[in-house]
Image (tube, rainbow, N blue to C red):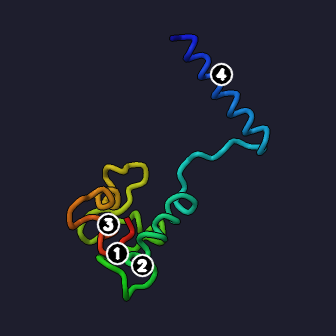
Amino acid sequence: MFVSFKRHLMLALLWTTTIIAVIGKPVDTAIQYNRDIRPILSENCFSCHGTDSASRKAGLRLDHFETATNKLESGVVAIVPGEPDRSEVVRRILATDDDQMPPAKVNKV
């Protein structure tokens, strides 16, 4: 078992070193709002929670990190960075009842 672990570790190190050699720097695997999260929200959420205040629902604006991570009047926080269990967005995405987002009627799921 120890040999297998060492082998996997060596393969991981080899792979990482190869990537660094090819692109010249370590791959950024940290989740970034604008690169990783915003495109998903743009496709699925911004029509109701974006820049247009006339069509915005529940006073929730997700198109800026600051507004997406602030406490709402209801007391919940849509996105709690690094804590998905405390993020209302995650709860709503996983919901199977009327709280589900995006709503089934918009056919985004």
Question: Where is residue 22 drawn, in percent x and y?
Answer: 78, 41
Task: Answer with mark 1 or mark 3, whichever residue precedes in sequence.
Answer: 3
Tell me which corner region of the image, top left, top right, bottom left or bottom right, holds residue 19.
top right
Q: What SS does tag 1 mark? A: helix
| C-alpha distance separating marks 4 and 2 | 47 Å
Residue at 37%, 49% (x, y): give it: 83
Mark 2 vs 1: CB contact within 8 A = yes
| Mark 2 / mark 3, whichever is N-terminal | 2
Q: CA distance from mark 1 to mark 4?
A: 48 Å
Pick whichever of labels 3 and 4 is earlier in the sequence: 4
Which circle's residue, 1 or 4, is located before the other in the chain? 4
Marks 1 & 3, CB-CB < 8 Å contact: no
Whether the residues at callouts 3 and 4 have beta carbons within 8 Å, the answer is no
Q: Earlier in the sequence, mark 4 or mark 2?
A: 4
Circle 3 is placed at which residue position?
A: 101
Q: Is residue 85 above or below residue 55?
A: above
Amino acid identity at mark 3: Met
Residue underneath mark 1? 106
Q: Is 62 rendered above or below residue 15?
A: below
Identify the element where label 2 is drawn. helix
Mark 4 crowdedness (10 Å alpha carbons): few <14, some 14-19, many ≥20: few
> Which of 63 and 39 lies nearest the eye of the viewer?
39
Give the Cα distance between marks 2 and 3: 12 Å
Where residue 71 appears, as percent x and y from the top left, is 32, 65
Q: Residue at x 36, y 81 (%)?
A: 56
Residue 47 tag number: 2
